[in-house]
């Protein structure tokens, strides 16, 4: 049984409860009063029309539309601008809920595979936690090459002018590819993060069992 | 009439002395006004000025006082001479403040002031000081009809103020609707859970109060008389009848839930598992008396899922059901959802709403329900399909746009059906039906008034009793009778209790005023009342039919019988009377007519048109005064006469004005119709009906229809009203001068 | 001893050769003038930033920030942590709030930190550099050091998102913060308080992953600055600075615009106004050169 089938089985018709227990800040979803201020405040909602703005996602969760919510690309459109958070009359931490649902969908393997921001998000975290500090060059390269080598070269060429500008201004160092900035206690960081993941996993599983 | 002595006083303060030739005004008062005594004063409203007038009254035999100073709305305390007839010429707000201080404006401004002096002198001579209503009653007892939360609160509050109360309740127990509730919406911090109804406490307060006389299983068989002297017959179940002397009445007859059997598409009446809010309260009470579990009526199984359908039979645009929102039902459904969640959080509890409206501190309550896991779904329920022991609720999800959303296997459906007022007979509909020859009357009368106009208080819309919704919410169109609680408009317990307190105080005020022979609002304290010269009456019944307050009955010969204490002094009867036999001591066909005739009409070559404005004293006249205070200028060709109400306008005034050579007449009254703002409710509407026939008069006089203008003016039209005047003045220039000048 | 001392959390983008290295250079010059001593937290690590959410989870993210708190407490006891980067400040501050309000999170965090041989006893205050400037020093103190006012330069104050929301600078509104405009006035330049794009999102990380969406937003930000007659844009955020500056060429291609407006850090304006050289202000770090500032920086100082 996959991770997804296990939780789906456990919560059956109660997707809201699943979100409350498994998603960071998920217990806030029930407090939405459907005013739509978040949707109206979202910068990406306006220009590229999210499939489901936050208000709608919350309603879908209450309506038990599990598959549609978790496979949606909507959460991944978040730019973390926090407009929705500060404007929500009910004080829902909407940005965090969006991230939380995205993380959960990703954890279950249900998030859209080729979603660029999803890919970048994972890449960023790996990049940052590998050495304790972000390597901007490797990060960019990683993103360009997500769709394979040829596309990567194309993407890189398209960004050539931008990159060149940064190199000239001393803000992009090609030598970063060969190592670059890092923390000294990398071992400690890895151990600490491993422990954190372990604790979090245990807690979520306990909720699932309970 | 023989020994009247008029004195005119002209003030020079507030810039009047600088802007006007006051000596000339004195001469006008003496010559044209034919006033034996005319004086100026530098500061008439100060102690010295007032003392001068008082001295003249005491020592010089002055009976009638004409004050040429500020508006009649200003300095009312200084210029209060209750023993005398008093007229005011508005030289400040009406003249110098609305005219520019320029050399070229000086002549027309002075002419305006002179006309107002002429008008004031003419008016005061046509007046007598009101002597007061001799036909008063002194009962201090308050009758409260209805023993629910509103009625009990009214009774308790009135009693605490020291007034005896007679409380009549139709059923065998106090409590009303609230008495049927398991719990109520909270009204105290932290607004998180249903609270005790508080009914038991109110009942014990009523029962323990020796100042409250209680009739249970009782109805009102007859209400006769007027404020201060109502005689009320109370019929009890046993058949016995009791008579009580009553000063004022508060009707707190509450509401009935809209009948869910009219909503078969929502399952109403089709399954025991579809209930209204009252049905759920009963289930909750039964549960509370047992193991706390709310059970399915069909088979007694515990309810595991419940759906609340908001706006059931409410806010219906088609006209089939209630068109309005009852306001209390969202909070009530939230409370009822908590009945389930508070005993068993596992019960699936969904409220389907289109707009959640939670007045008061309902927002906190709403949030608390969300915290407790009540699911709120924004949707419109299309159908409830009962099937065996469960139902399927089909709805349109308004957020997700899903037209085929549904919830299956629902154990219990609760319909929030809203409030229908228990307001008795709709007397207007009865009158209409009587005309059509239909006699059947469905609802039973509550007050059984012996009034000529009908047995109950008039209704506005949808069965709710009529009251001036902005200024006088508790006042009905029957003086001394107040409505409070859901009979007046849909409301919850907290609002009903506030209503009850307000109505109790208004009722006390009314009975106190009645004893002193004074008018209730909006002319509170007015001692004048309509006098009729019966020998001239043609028994046409217009006054008895039109009186917005049902103050006039008819005797067996169909002559009008005035009940002064029921009268609000609007003068609608006076405006209606075709033979002009109705008048007030200080307001009559003559007091206004004399003013109209007193104005000096320049000839047609002068290029000085004259426009008469008859302005309602409640809205238009204050708006004009405030225009003056804001120094908003308007034409010097208008002459303004305040009137009590558009309803008091007798068409003879308009005919007289046109015959006298006025170029145009502006009628300024309040908004009429369902959204009326008339302080006398129906006055402006009736006035306008009369006015609509003025076109015929104009035709007979061979005059253009532009010469009479009917305008709606609100008290806030401070900027707009000068603009209306100026535009009309310009329009009349195009029409040309009246052909009647100089005749 | 310096007037003000803080534990400094520079963040990944401020490192040598990284995208905001010019920010760090100018902050260092600025702090020298203002007698503010910043001591780098030894071996600090990345904050995780908001974009790491797909993999980060809740606890690992907070543990990452908590490690910096622990290091600060160990090496720089009693000092407040100051960040120059909006994301670092936001991430650290969010961790501080969450740990303060949840005993479970706190104890879980301590347990994880043990693996790295660290612990937290006291929760540090997390400050943004602009908070230090406004609250600890004040506008009067900042203005005292202006010896070369940026007269006649019209500058749009672009606050962006994460310095402004959800925490923001105390006393400022989320919809129309004015401190940046006041800083522009403070250095003698002309502010544009009515600049309506001052809190619009630059697209954040979407500038990398979904450039067309982010660039549509950046276009509005730049266009409005031009409409208001701005010669340059100033911001307190490294990602805002980079996004608004470096994609102007691509936007020009995409929309046929002719954008070429420099995007500066407040610290760069202050360094020039304080009499610093172009090098002190790291003006060479601009992809779109700020010629006007370079000219001013070349002028002699009025003493």
Image: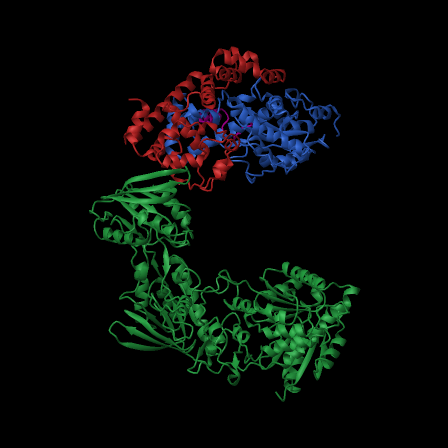
Chain colours: A red, B green, C blue
Q: Which corner quadrant holds the N terminus of chain B? A: bottom right
Horizontal side of residue B300 vs A147, given as left or right: left
> In which quadrant of the rendered view does residue C228 lie?
top right
Farthest residue toward the bottom? Answer: B2
Q: Is residue A199 above or below residue A182?
A: below
In the image, B207 versus B151, the foreground residue is B151
Percent coordinates x, y for residue C178 in the rendering: 61, 38
In the image, C126 versus B482, the foreground residue is B482
Residue at image position (53%, 35%) is C168
Percent coordinates x, y for residue B389 in the rendering: 23, 44
C66 within the magenta span: yes
Q: Is residue B719 above or below residue A147?
A: below
Asked whether the viewer can see residue B74, the reply is: no
Horizontal side of residue A135 vs B27, given as left or right: left
Percent coordinates x, y for residue A10 in the rendering: 28, 30
Percent coordinates x, y for residue B357 in the rendering: 42, 49
User: Which span of residues is magenta-colored?
Assistant: C65-84
């Amino acid at each position: 049984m996959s991770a997804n089938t296990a939780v789906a089985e456990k919560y059956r018709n109660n997707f809201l409860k699943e979100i409350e227990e498994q998603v960071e800040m998920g217990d806030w979803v029930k407090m939405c009063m459907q005013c739509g201020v978040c949707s109206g405040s979202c910068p990406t909602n306006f220009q590229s029309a999210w499939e489901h703005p936050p208000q709608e996602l919350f309603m879908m969760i209450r309506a038990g539309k599990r598959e549609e919510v978790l496979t949606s690309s909507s959460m991944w459109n978040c730019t973390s601008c926090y407009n929705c958070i500060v404007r929500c009359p009910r004080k829902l931490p909407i940005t965090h809920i969006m991230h939380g649902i995205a993380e959960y969908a990703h954890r279950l393997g249900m998030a859209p595979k080729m979603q660029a921001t999803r890919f970048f998000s994972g890449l960023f975290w790996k990049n940052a936690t590998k050495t304790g500090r972000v390597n901007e060059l490797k990060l960019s390269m990683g993103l360009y090459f997500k769709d394979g080598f040829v596309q990567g070269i194309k993407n890189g060429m398209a960004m050539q002018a931008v990159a060149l500008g940064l190199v000239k201004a001393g803000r992009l160092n090609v030598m970063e590819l060969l190592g670059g900035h890092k923390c000294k206690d990398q071992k400690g960081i890895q151990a600490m993060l491993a422990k954190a993941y372990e604790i979090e996993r245990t807690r979520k599983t306990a909720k699932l069992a309970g | 009439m023989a020994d009247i002595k008029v004195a005119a006083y002209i003030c020079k303060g507030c810039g009047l002395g600088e802007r006007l030739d006051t000596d000339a005004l004195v001469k006008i008062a003496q010559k044209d006004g034919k006033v034996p005594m005319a004086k100026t004063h530098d500061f008439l409203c100060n102690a010295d000025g007032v003392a001068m007038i008082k001295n003249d009254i005491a020592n010089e035999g002055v009976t009638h006082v004409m004050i040429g100073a500020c508006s009649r709305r200003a300095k009312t305390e200084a210029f209060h001479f209750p023993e005398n007839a008093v007229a005011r010429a508005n030289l400040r707000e009406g003249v110098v403040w609305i005219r520019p201080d320029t050399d070229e404006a000086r002549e027309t401004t002075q002419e305006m002031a002179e006309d107002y002096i002429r008008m004031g002198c003419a008016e005061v001579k046509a007046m007598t000081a009101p002597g007061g209503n001799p036909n008063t009653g002194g009962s201090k007892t308050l009758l409260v009809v209805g023993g629910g939360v509103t009625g009990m609160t009214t009774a308790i509050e009135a009693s605490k103020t020291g007034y005896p109360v007679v409380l009549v309740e139709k059923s065998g127990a106090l409590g009303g609707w609230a008495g049927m509730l398991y719990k109520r919406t909270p009204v105290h911090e932290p607004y998180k859970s249903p609270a005790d109804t508080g009914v038991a406490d109110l009942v014990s307060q009523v029962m323990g109060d020796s100042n409250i006389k209680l009739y249970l299983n009782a109805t009102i068989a007859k209400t006769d008389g007027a404020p201060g002297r109502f005689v009320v017959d109370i019929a009890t179940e046993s058949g016995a009848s009791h008579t009580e002397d009553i000063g004022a009445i508060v009707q707190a007859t509450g509401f009935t839930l809209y009948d869910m059997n009219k909503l078969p598409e929502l399952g109403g009446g089709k399954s025991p598992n579809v209930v209204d809010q009252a049905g759920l309260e009963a289930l909750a009470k039964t549960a509370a008396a047992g193991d706390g579990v709310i059970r399915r009526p069909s088979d007694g199984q515990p309810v595991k899922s419940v759906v609340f359908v908001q706006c059931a039979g409410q806010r219906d645009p088609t006209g089939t059901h209630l068109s309005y929102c009852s306001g209390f039902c969202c909070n009530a459904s939230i409370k009822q959802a908590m009945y389930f969640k508070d005993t068993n959080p596992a019960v699936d509890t969904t409220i389907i709403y289109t707009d959640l409206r939670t007045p008061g501190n309902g927002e906190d309550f709403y949030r608390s329900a969300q915290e407790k896991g009540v699911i709120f779904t924004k949707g419109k329920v299309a159908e409830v399909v009962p099937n065996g022991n469960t139902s399927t609720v089909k709805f349109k999800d308004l957020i997700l746009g899903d037209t085929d959303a549904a919830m299956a296997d629902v154990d219990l459906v609760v319909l929030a059906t809203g409030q229908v007022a228990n307001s008795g007979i709709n007397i207007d509909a009865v009158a209409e039906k009587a005309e059509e020859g239909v006699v059947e009357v469905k609802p039973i009368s509550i007050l059984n008034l012996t009034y000529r106009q009908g047995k109950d208080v008039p209704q506005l819309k949808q069965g709710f009793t009529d009251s001036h919704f902005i200024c006088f919410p508790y006042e009905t169109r029957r003086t001394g009778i107040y409505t409070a609680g859901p009979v007046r408009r849909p409301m919850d317990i907290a609002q009903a209790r506030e209503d009850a307190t307000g109505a109790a105080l208004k009722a006390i005020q009314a009975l106190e005023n009645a004893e002193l022979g004074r008018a209730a609002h909006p002319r509170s304290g007015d001692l004048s009342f309509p006098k009729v010269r019966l020998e001239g009456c043609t028994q046409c019944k217009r006054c008895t039919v039109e009186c917005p307050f049902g103050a006039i009955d008819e005797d067996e010969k169909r002559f009008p019988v005035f009940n002064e204490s029921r009268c609000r002094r609007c003068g609608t009867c006076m405006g209606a009377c075709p033979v002009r036999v109705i008048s007030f001591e200080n307001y009559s066909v003559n007091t206004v007519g004399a003013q109209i005739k007193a104005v000096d009409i320049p000839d047609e070559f002068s290029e000085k048109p004259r426009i008469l404005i008859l302005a309602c004293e409640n809205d238009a006249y204050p708006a004009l005064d405030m225009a003056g205070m804001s120094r908003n200028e308007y034409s010097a060709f208008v002459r303004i006469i305040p009137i009590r109400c558009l309803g008091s306008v007798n068409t003879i005034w308009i005919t007289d004005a046109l015959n006298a050579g006025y170029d145009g007449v502006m009628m300024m009254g309040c908004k009429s119709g369902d959204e009326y703002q008339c302080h006398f409710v129906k006055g402006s509407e009736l006035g306008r009906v009369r006015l609509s026939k003025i076109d015929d008069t104009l035709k007979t006089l061979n005059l253009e229809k532009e010469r009479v203008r009917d305008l709606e003016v609100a008290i806030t039209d401070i900027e707009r009203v000068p603009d209306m005047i100026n535009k009309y003045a310009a329009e009349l220039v195009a029409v040309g001068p009246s052909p009647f000048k100089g005749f | 001893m310096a007037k003000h001392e803080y534990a400094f959390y520079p963040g990944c983008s401020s490192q040598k050769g990284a995208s905001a290295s010019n920010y760090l250079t100018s902050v260092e010059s600025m702090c020298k003038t203002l007698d503010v001593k910043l001591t780098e937290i030894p071996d600090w690590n990345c904050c995780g930033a908001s974009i790491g959410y797909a993999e980060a989870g809740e606890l690992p993210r907070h543990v990452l920030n908590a490690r910096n708190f622990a290091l600060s407490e160990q090496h720089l006891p009693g000092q407040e942590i100051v960040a120059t980067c909006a994301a670092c400040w936001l991430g650290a501050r969010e961790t501080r709030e969450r740990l303060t309000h949840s005993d479970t999170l706190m104890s879980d965090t301590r347990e994880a930190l043990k693996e790295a041989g660290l612990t937290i006893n006291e929760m540090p205050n997390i400050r943004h550099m602009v908070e230090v400037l406004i609250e600890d020093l004040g506008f009067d103190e900042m203005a005292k050091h202006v010896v070369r006012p940026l007269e006649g330069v019209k500058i749009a104050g672009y606050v962006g998102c994460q310095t402004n929301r959800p925490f923001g600078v105390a006393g400022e509104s989320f919809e129309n913060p004015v401190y940046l405009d006041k800083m522009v006035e403070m250095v003698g330049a002309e502010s544009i308080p009515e600049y309506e794009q001052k809190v619009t999102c630059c697209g954040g990380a979407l500038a990398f992953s979904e450039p067309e969406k982010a660039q549509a937003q950046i276009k509005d930000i730049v266009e409005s600055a031009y409409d208001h007659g701005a010669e340059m844009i100033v911001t307190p955020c490294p990602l805002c600075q980079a996004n608004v500056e470096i994609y102007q060429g691509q936007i020009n291609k995409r929309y046929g615009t002719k954008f070429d407006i420099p995007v500066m850090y407040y610290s760069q304006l202050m360094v020039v106004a304080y009499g610093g050289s172009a090098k002190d202000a790291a003006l060479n770090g601009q992809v779109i050169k700020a010629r006007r500032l370079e000219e001013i920086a070349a002028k002699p100082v009025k003493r």
